[in-house]
Amino acid sequence: MKTGSLRLRLWAAAAISLAVALVVAGLGLVYLFELHVERRIKSDLEVQLNQLVAGTRFVADRLEVQSEPSDPRFAVPLSGYYWQVEDPATQALVRSRSLWDEVLALPDPLVADGAVHLHELSGPNGALLIAVERTITEPDGRSFRAMVTEDHTALT
């Protein structure tokens, strides 16, 4: 074929168009898959958070978690799966066994009552965590913040 032939130019245009389309499609699929995994993780964490909130009560003047989330990974020390409940008035903490001696730094400010907030924070050994938290106000006016986290590597 000649270098300036119409056939060669059409083949080159088709090859470039296909390459661009494949790159765009690949990037789009990666983005959609990440979005799906993030939604699944958030959904799973919200289920665990709801279990934690349902089992948390004020008994006399102290905060008590009467039933913990059912996932056994919350009992394995430094597993990447953690929960923590805080009484903002007294700074009292109740936390999962998996946190061992660590305390998760809850972000400020408090989220609106009942609203679930998703964010990332630093966990034990500097690990990046995905967290969902909710502030609950009881009928007597006392409130607590509950948070459930998962290691960010699940998303990566």
Image (spheres, rainbow, N blue to C red):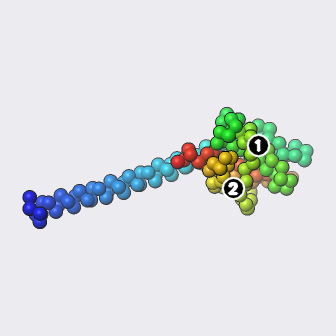
Residue 9: give x, y in percent of width and height: 16, 62
Task: Rate crowding at label 2 as few (under 14), some (14 to 19) or many (20 or more) other CA atoms within 10 Å.
Answer: few
Assign a secondary structure to mark 2.
Answer: loop
Residue 124: give x, y in percent of width and height: 68, 46
Give the mark toward the camera: 2 or 1.
1
Q: What label sits on residue 128 in the rendered view?
A: none
User: Which residue, as the protein is rendered here, is positioned at the far left?
Assistant: 2
Which badge, 2 or 1, is on the more N-terminal residue? 1
User: Which residue, as the protein is rendered here, is positioned at the far top?
Assistant: 72
Q: Residue at x 46, y 53 (%)?
A: 31
Q: Which residue is mark 1?
A: 101
Q: CA distance from mark 2 to mark 1?
A: 28 Å
Residue 38: give x, y in percent of width and height: 55, 49
Task: Rate crowding at label 1 as few (under 14), some (14 to 19) or many (20 or more) other CA atoms within 10 Å.
Answer: few
Q: Residue at x 66, y 36 (%)?
A: 73
Tally the numbered discs: 2
Q: Quadrant of the N terminus?
A: bottom left
Amino acid carrying label 1: it is: Asp
User: Which residue, as the protein is rendered here, is positioned at the far right?
Assistant: 60
Q: Which residue is mark 2?
A: 115
Q: Is residue 11 left or right of residue 48?
A: left
The answer to the question of whether label 2 and label 1 lie on touching residues, with beta carbons closer than 8 A, is no
Question: Residue 88 is drawn in which quadrant?
Answer: bottom right
Q: Is residue 135 left or right of residue 62?
A: left
Q: Residue at x 68, y 40 (%)?
A: 78
Amino acid carrying label 2: it is: Ala
Is residue 71 something one can see in this rendering? no
Q: Is residue 132 left or right of residue 23?
A: right
Q: Residue at x 46, y 52 (%)?
A: 32
